[in-house]
Image (cartoon, rainbow, N blue to C red):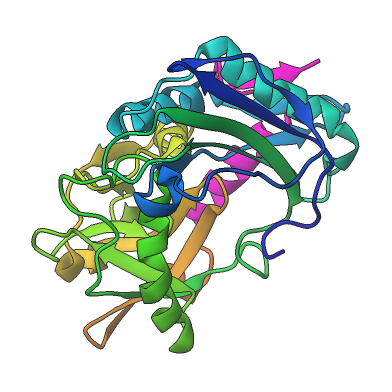
Amino acid sequence: MGYALKETEFRYRAYTEKGEWQKGSLTTNKNISIHEGSNVFHYGQALFEGLKAYKTKTGKTQLFRPDLNFIRINEGLRRLVAPELPEDLFFEAIIEVVKANQDDIPEYGKGQSLYIRPFVIGQGMNLGVKPSDEYLFSVFCAPVGTYFAGGLQALEFVTTDYDRASANGTGQVKVAGNYAASLYPRSLAKKEGYAGVIYLDPLTHSKIDEVGAANFFGITHDNVLVTPRSSSILPSITKKSILYIAEHMLGMKVEERPCFIDNVDEFKEAGACGTAAIITPIKSITHKGKVTQFGEGNVGPTVKKLYDTLVGIYYGDIEAPEGWIQEIK
């Protein structure tokens, strides 16, 4: 099962009818039956989101910035020429699934959470290269631990000549095809003993884009938090949150700008961030045989402070900025 600790019982399903989303419902059926000619199989009309539910010390269940997941999934649906999800349908599905699987939300103090996976696929017979006439929206969930084995520890990464996405392609939306394209370069890196790959910009291969399925950030020697700016990067909710925390809670200067791989030693610390990874410290980046190490090979103090602050907000131990938390009652 990989990242998931177990399967849960309930999931939510909704379908379109004549191009409009209909009210959905919970089901215990883990399997989906769709036509063999469905777009999801042949033309990749599929995208997903990822968010988490957390238990606080007082027993409350809360979501972290789900409004941004709603915005991002509809940006993706527009890109795939699929009908956008109504806000009430999206949140009904999320909340009903969390409530129905309440007993599987890990208790406070375990460092675990309930990962929630909403997704949309094109279905129905279609052998022409065009948008589907029918769609399925589903949400399922699973309790999870840490994405990388071993918890918060610095990991080694290597650059790749393969591209995750094209410069004006689907890199900015969470489509399934982006992840399919990442499997081969990741497998090569794993065989060489690395935790994963660093993708460079597809136009020039001179700037850092992403760290596998996560966003990159670095801390310069004069304590500025920098994240890449690129047309092929997924707009990470975790990265957006880290930028805010660094600037408004830790008093740091922040920048979104190109991060040139040949100038990566401008960073004293580096990390990868995303819903699954949260924050993963980067121990080193190997590029064309040259190894650049960060944080003296350990978890750097600023990365640790960002991690502790973000996780503290997740679990309700640190007061969140206004609008970041949605409690499920």
Q: Nearer the viewer, residue 47 or 68?
A: 47
Q: Is residue 98 above or below residue 23?
A: below
The residue at 82%/25% (across/down) is: 99
Q: Is residue 259 above or below residue 65?
A: below
The C terminus lies in quadrant: top right
From the top left corner, tell me how far across and down residue 64 is, in percent. 61, 29
- Queried whether the magenta region covers residue 202, the answer comes back as no
From the top left corner, tell me how far across and down residue 200 is, in percent. 22, 63
From the top left corner, tell me how far across and down residue 55 is, in percent. 80, 34
Q: Quadrant of residue 26?
A: top right
The residue at 53%/64% (across/down) is: 299
Residue that protrudes farthest toward the right in the picture: 103
Q: Nearer the viewer, residue 190 or 32?
A: 32
Q: Which residues are magenta?
A: 301-329
From the top left corner, tell me how far across and down residue 278 is, in percent. 56, 49
Q: Is residue 124 left or right of residue 228?
A: right
Q: Nearer the viewer, residue 92 or 143?
A: 92
Q: Is residue 115 above or below residue 81?
A: below
Residue 284 visible = no
Q: Is residue 138 left or right of residue 225?
A: right
